[in-house]
Amino acid sequence: MASLSNLKQCPQFTSPTVAGHLCNSTPGLDHYPVINLKNELLSTTSQRFTVGQSFMPVESESVPKRISRAFFDGGFWESLAEARSKKTREQAPLISTTADRLAQLLEQYKALQLKVFPHTQELSAERIAQYAETRDWINSAIRCTAWHCHLFKLAVAGVDDVVRIYMKRTDNNGMTPVLKSPSQTQITCMAWRPLCAFELVVGCRQGMCFWTIDNNLHLGRTMNPSHIIKHPSNLPITTLQWNKDGTQLATASIGDRAILIFQPDNGMMQPLRRLGPPGALLKWSPGNEWIFASTVDRVFRVWKCHDRWTTDRWVCNEGNVQAACWSPCGRFLLFASTSEPILYRLQFVKLHLGPAKGDDKEVLPVADLNAVTLDGSNQTLIGGTAQQLAWDPHGKYLVITFKSTNSIAIFRTYIQKFDLQISGGYYLSGETASEYPSYVCFQPLNRENDLSVLTIGWSSGRIQFHSLD
């Protein structure tokens, strides 16, 4: 079983990450853009205020008026808080007493509901961050990155709820298309539609925003989404994946047990329902044959796309599956849970002639991810619970980031028809000891790229491109 104990420092074959600063850049990455969201985010995080904050409430307002104003400004819970406030308690004790008893009843009902249905708790930002692939999703400058399947286009979602589209340095004349909308907040995931040059879908608190990015538009101009699809239960979309030909879009929410399969061309939606906890992570296999679906609990499933959506079910010993990825050939699935620093393998190839046997889909440990020191140092650690997995499109390298340590582990992988071998490789670290990878992905292979280019979104807001070939 592979381990982190014999990793070596990765050779620096990277693109420039800051203007004027080169890190042994290779000629093949010279045309990659220089991206650092830090300055852009600083300009958008200035002090903000709402219209309601511009005016002071009138001191002579009656209690019913204050409660009704709180209801229209902030909803039922704000009005209930106003009814229980110290000022209302002095002016109208009967109203405050009634509000106290109503709040007690609601708390008892909520506690009973959580005992019976523990996964129905409110979908706060903290809960979304708990199951997101992005490390420190709430505070990280970069929340998600997504490469176009066929073209040199990189979408980067920032903590400011803005998606920026980057192309080659020579293609956009220094201008960057910006995708921003009031209906696009708390971005969790996004994906370019395969076999389509201009369509990007963004999963967020309000549902899914579909953007059409036309190159003929003036770059730098803010556009509006072509259309928005909301979750049937008004829940945030926390994970989404296109199939290989872009005809079906699989989505899930940590507040819903069903996986929703959308067909955007005809407007149809098919829910895949099973008893159990809500979904947390989806991964469509490269050949369209399987969908891996983890949940917020120990259960995870693999759906058979071409067999009337039947499913195989597994259960973790503890915790839930945090990270998963398919091999480029689609025969192997790697995953890691939140309960132990072990990387597991599932294989989807028959080892015997005739009907499938239990051994064909046995879960096997393939790598020990327990934390170790780097290069004999007593201070710098790598390893622990996995945060994200990414497999390069050539099938030669597996990248793992971690929840509590700041370096990136890169394993070598050897894919055979019936077997997978993993061995130690390299590690990558940030420019400072406190910098950690927020989100990683590989650029797909296409006519413009035949390299294994790892794209790293660091917590500081910079994007690093690292060639592993």
Image (tube, helix red, strand yellow):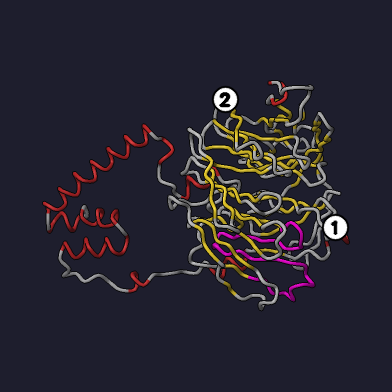
| Left/right of residue 32 with respect to residue 70 in the rendered view | right
Q: Does residue 224 lie above or below 92 as drawn?
A: below
| Residue at image location 83% in from the left, 61% down from the top | 448
- Circle 2: residue type: Asn
- Circle 1: residue type: Asn
Say which mark, if any, is on residue 317: 2
Q: Secondary structure at mark 2?
A: loop
| Residue at image location 34% in from the left, 69% down from the top | 53
Residue 151: % across, % down: 76, 62
Q: Nearer the viewer, mark 1 or mark 2?
A: 2
Q: Are marks 1 and 2 in contact (CB under 8 Å)?
A: no
| Most common SS among magenta residues | loop
Magenta stretch: residue 394 in it?
Answer: no
C-alpha span from label 1 to label 2 = 45 Å
Start-end of magenta stretch: 148-177
Which residue matches tag 1? 24
Say which mark, if any, is on residue 293: none
